[in-house]
Amino acid sequence: MFDLNIVLIEGIVTVSLVLEETDDGLTFTRFPIRNNECGEIQVVVWSNLAESAKKYAKVGDRIRIRGRLEKGGKEIVAQSIDYLPKSDLWRIKPDEKTDL
């Protein structure tokens, strides 16, 4: 029997995304998001989704990640990303605290 491993989390992008490539030619990006309940969480995004994330996710943007936990619960591998509406309430600078 398999354990369920599904994550749905919203957070704020805290760095500019950079695309990288594995030795096998797979594109990916790894970046942190900040969530009020969990603090900073690492997200990994692969292939076409990584290219879309690089194009649309900017520092201070609020996004919703659907994915699974990896590395002992310290990293989320994204399966989808929703880009949430921009609102002044959620726009922060990367070094600001998010005690909202």
Image (cartoon, rainbow, N blue to C red):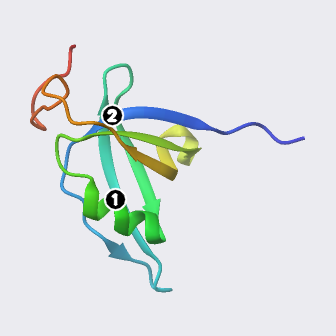
Q: Is residue 47 above or below residue 13?
A: below
Q: Nearer the viewer, residue 61 or 16?
A: 61
Residue in front for this viewpoint, 94 or 63: 63
Quarter containing the C terminus: top left
Left or right: residue 7 compared with residue 100: right
Q: Amino acid at mark 2?
A: Gly
The residue pinned by badge 2 equals 11
29 to the left or right of 4: left
The quarter of the picture where the N terminus appears is top right
The residue drawn where x is 22% and y is 41% is: 61
Q: Residue at x 44, y 59 (%)?
A: 45
Q: Residue 12 placed where, x, y %?
A: 26, 36
- Residue at x 26%, y 52% (from the top left corner): 57
Image position, residue 52 (x, y; %): 36, 64
Q: Is residue 15 left or right of residue 19?
A: left
Crowd band around label 2 with a 10 angstrom C-alpha radius: few (<14), some (14–19), many (20+): many
From the top left corner, tell me how far across and down residue 3 is, in percent.
78, 37
- The residue sitting at the right extreme is 1
Precedes in sequence: disc 1 or disc 2: 2
Snapshot quadrant of residue 11: top left
Cα separation between marks 1 and 2 = 14 Å
Q: How many marks?
A: 2
Q: Secondary structure at mark 1?
A: helix
Badge 2 marks a residue whose secondary structure is strand
Tell whether 85 sits left or right of 25. left
Q: Height in image: 7 above or below 20?
A: above
Residue at (13% x, 38% y) in the render: 94
Q: Say which amino acid is labelled 1.
A: Ala
- Residue at the far bottom in the pictured view: 24
Label number found at residue 7: none
Residue 53's disc is 1
